Amino acid sequence: MLNDQLDGITPFLAVAELKSFTEAAVRLGVTPTAVSKAIRVLERRYGVVLFQRTTRRVALTEAGDSLYRQMRPAVADMLAAIETLEHYRHRPQGTLRVTAPRNNTADYLFNAIVPRFRQAYPEVMLDISLDDGLVDIVAEGYDAGIRLGESVEGDMAAVRLTPEITWSVVATPAYFTRAGRPVIPEDLVSHEAIRYRFVTSRAMHRWAFRSGRRDFVVDAKGGIIVNDRNLLIEFALKGLGLAFVSDYEVRHHIAAGRLESVLREYIPADSGVFLYFPQRSQTQPKLRAFIDMAKEVASQPGFLDRFRQ
């Protein structure tokens, strides 16, 4: 319906501005006959005459002049709005929505990227959502996500941000002196565990191990459940039990002797953390700028050292 109402408006505006059907046809790249036909259709549709035409002169009627005065600013606004699309094509701006899990990797990455990104691209609003669960970034309207490689869908483009992530079970030296050191994963059933519950799904993190070609889970028991990684580590530091953690989360505590790790050889490494996004979206300037800055931050020695053995 709207298309029908607007049909003929472009030729009308061109003739009204140039006062010539011939010149309007040249501007529009059509024949003068096509312009005349479009104007006749427009006049017939609304039952008014828009132009007075003679062999020497083209002039607006009162009705035509009223339509032109009202349509000209509206069309100018529409053209200006369309021109802004060029800015989106060439300059980063708009809102960039990113989803990531609640962990130290995302915290460190965002702390490193966000201040620099905002300074470099002030016209981009960053909308960051932390969510432990798997997120369909297309369905949920996100531009990009940060997740372990195992969680990234196969049809996404992905950029590696970290090396493989290794894991171990940790506790304080005092805890191991009191309760003994587990030698194999099955020994965990007689130990006190501090367990982690994912915030979004509310599922309990299960302690997964591999021995030879056999993958298995040990459901360690314990009297403490948390949904915060920092609190998990704090309770382990207090000697309240064992914690299943990535090595980079506790590297400085292990180096200082506050925690000791066991069973690392039984825990398969994760593929690492990736920034991922739909294939077609990476040409957007706002996303391209974020990708490039994330890659730059992730390539710095200070960032990589957090994940090295």
Image (cartoon, rainbow, N blue to C red):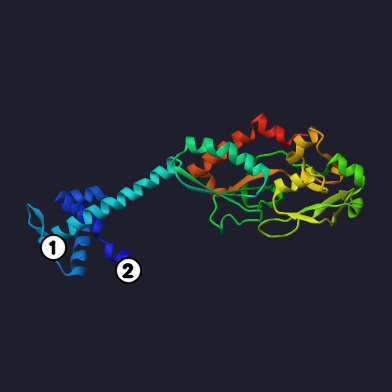
Q: In which quarter of the image is the C terminus?
A: top right
Residue 162 rendering spot, x and y as whole percentages: 69, 39
Q: Nearer the viewer, residue 144 or 126?
A: 126
Neighbours of disc 1 within 10 Å: few (<14), some (14-19), many (20+)? few
Query: To which residue does mark 1 refer?
Result: 63
- Residue 265 visible in this rendered orientation of the protein: no
The residue under the point 79% across, 33% down is 255
Residue 254 visible in rendering: yes
Left or right of 68, for residue 98:
right
Compare residues 21 and 135 and report the one nearer the observer: 135
Image point 71% across, 50% down: which residue? 150
Residue at 26% across / 55% down in the picture?
74
The N terminus: image quadrant? bottom left
Image coordinates for residue 205, horizontal then vertical, percent: 76, 55
Q: Name the residue under label 2.
A: 1
**Gap in Å between the C-alphas at discs 2 and 1?**
22 Å
- Nearer to us in this view, 150 or 309: 309
Task: Give, as a three-letter code, the residue at label 1.
Answer: Ala
Nearer to us in this view, 205 or 307: 205
Compared with 131, 175 (above or below) is above
